[in-house]
Image (tube, helix red, strand yellow):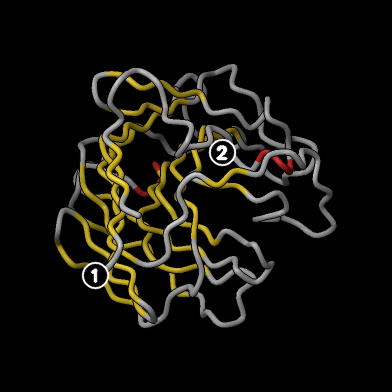
């Protein structure tokens, strides 16, 4: 099924998107995204009073505004011996397997924040946990003329995959809109920015993924505590391969 999300209107399409970040480890309240849809874009932000996510268990203090196109309770554990706190949070909005997938987005982050678009294995089975990172941008990797853009594959608990992730330093202003994409075929991933081919990886997950868009703040890191990290998304697309 094709997805061409343009964020029209003034509300998020909650048949496709779940405005929470892994609520099963935390709660619906602590995981809720601060978001709005207006003027043809989705905005995610983290205000100064945004709650910490899973503050009693996550090692580093973390605040996040994220939307997901799926959620399986128990997926993406961040430490051993976790217990599911919110089991009634299963959601299946849009779960692609292979295709041409991308986002048009921009962000406003500092040295203590980041924004990203990534595709996480749905984890109907625990090993189906590979993650395709289309773009991960930390404010600490931005200077006057360039930015580091994290691109690649995280294997996590999938024994069939090898870790292959790298932050590319590019001449790019990430506060402007750019298109970040991946062509996902059986056995390969090809990444691009604004249509420019950046790298190819000769491996890929062999199961559906959920789309994830999020902005993150790390309060214990150096940076302006009064800054509100934000990201704007004009379009998300996912076209099955013919």
Name the quadrant containing residue 26. Answer: top right
Q: Which residue is mark 1?
A: 242
Q: Which residue is mark 2?
A: 221
Q: What residue lies at 80% left-to-right and 37% top-to-bottom?
A: 56
Residue 26 vertical placement versus 127 (above, below) = above
Q: Earlier in the sequence, mark 1 or mark 2?
A: 2
Residue 148 vertical placement versus 23 (above, below) = below
Q: Residue 171: image x %, image y %? A: 18, 53
Q: What residue lies at 28% left-to-right and 26% top-to-bottom?
A: 8
Q: Secondary structure at mark 2?
A: loop
- On-image quarter of the C terminus: bottom left
Left or right of 96, for residue 184: left
Q: Residue 142: image x %, image y %? A: 32, 45
Q: Residue 19: image x %, image y %? A: 53, 32
Name the quadrant containing residue 174. Answer: top left
Q: Secondary structure at mark 1?
A: loop
């Amino acid at each position: 099924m094709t997805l061409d999300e343009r964020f029209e209107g003034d509300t998020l399409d909650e048949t496709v998107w779940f405005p929470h970040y892994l609520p099963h480890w935390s709660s619906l309240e602590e995981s809720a995204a601060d978001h709005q849809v207006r003027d043809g874009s989705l905005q995610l932000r983290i205000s100064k009073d945004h709650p910490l996510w899973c503050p009693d268990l996550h090692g580093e203090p973390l605040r996040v505004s994220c939307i997901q196109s799926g959620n399986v309770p128990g997926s993406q554990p961040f430490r051993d011996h976790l217990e599911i706190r919110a089991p009634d949070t299963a959601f299946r909005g849009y779960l692609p397997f292979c295709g041409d997938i991308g986002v048009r987005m921009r962000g406003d982050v500092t040295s203590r924040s980041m924004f990203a678009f990534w595709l996480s294995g749905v984890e109907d089975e625990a090993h189906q946990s590979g993650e395709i990172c289309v773009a991960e941008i930390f404010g600490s990797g931005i200077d006057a003329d360039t930015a580091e853009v994290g691109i690649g594959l995280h294997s996590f608990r999938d024994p069939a995959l090898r870790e292959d992730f790298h932050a590319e330093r590019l001449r790019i202003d990430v506060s402007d809109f750019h298109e970040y994409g991946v062509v996902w075929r059986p056995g390969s991933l090809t990444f691009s920015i604004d249509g420019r081919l950046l790298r190819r990886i000769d491996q890929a997950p062999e199961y559906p993924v959920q789309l994830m868009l999020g902005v993150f703040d790390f309060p214990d890191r150096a940076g302006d505590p009064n800054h509100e990290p934000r990201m704007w998304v004009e379009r998300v697309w996912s076209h099955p391969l013919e």
